[in-house]
Image (cartoon, helix red, strand yellow):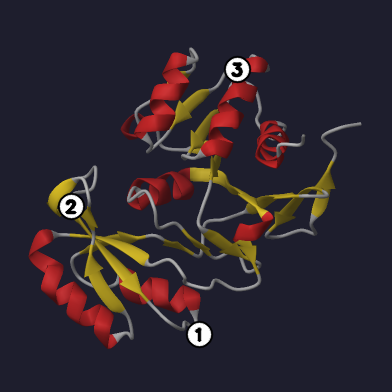
Amino acid sequence: MRNIKQECAQAASKLIRDHSIIGLGGGSTITYLIQYIKQQNLHVNIVTPSFTTKSLCLRNGLNVLHTSFIDHIDIAFDGCDEVDKDFNALKSGGGIHTKEKLIANMANEYILLVDESKFVSALTFKQPIVLEVLEDALEYVSKTIIELGGEPNYRKSAVKDGVTISDNGHLLIDATFDHVEDIPKLEDQLNSISGVIDTSLFTKVITKVIVAKEDGIEVYSKNDQSYRVKIHE
């Protein structure tokens, strides 16, 4: 039985050069990619914002660097909730988007790995945009989100009393928007709010999307035509 996430990871592994610095996000496809890096005996240095990914890399004998010690990344791979054909993406689940976006901006190439259900013509915003914010700015940021047409909610967890704290020690606001006409403009507006550190809306950093489909793997490049990848000869 085919495993399309595994095939997606295999296609991604073909883009990794030996002795490069790579960024890795989180998720099951990234787990498969780590396996291919090890199997192919690629000598790479890895940076990641994900505790789970970092632990898995170390258990597999891969070298992990602290992001603060480097100033560039050759290529980075990540997942998302949705990405559209204009290369806008939404990453809502993990609450580590600030560090994910840092890695994306540091990378020469930032590539999303998704199955075809997550590759859409336009973002649906069924998931909220997450804002990491300073505690002192909570009410001000919430008011401004409402003025922009959104509905803010402080993120909470069923396994923790009170609000959720990010890895950076800040609070998270889930902002729900029913309809967005100009996605890049919304990202700029949210990022311009004083007290917002960053958002989980990615509109400027994605260079490729590798889509795992039932009939094969397709790679969409921001500046080129799409192409298919042969996994099985």
Q: Position of residue 89 (x, y in %)?
A: 52, 62
Q: Residues within 10 Å of mark 2 (few under 14, many from 20)?
A: some
Q: Which mark is residue 170?
A: 2
Check disc 3 and report its element: helix, strand or loop: helix
Q: Residues within 10 Å of mark 3 (few under 14, many from 20)?
A: some
Residue under numbered circle 3: 38
Residue at 39%, 23% (x, y): give it. Answer: 55
Tell me if 194 is positioned left or right of 115 in this view: left
Tell me which corner region of the image, top left, top right, bottom left or bottom right, holds residue 43: top right
Name the amino acid, label 1.
Answer: Glu
Name the amino acid, label 3.
Answer: Lys
Check disc 2 and report its element: helix, strand or loop: loop
Residue at 60%, 30% (x, y): give it. Answer: 32
Residue at 29%, 72% (x, y): give it. Answer: 192
Give the residue at the far right of this rendering: 233
Give the mark, 3 or 2, whose residue is nearer the N terminus.
3
Give the mark, 1 or 3, whose residue is nearer the N terminus.
3
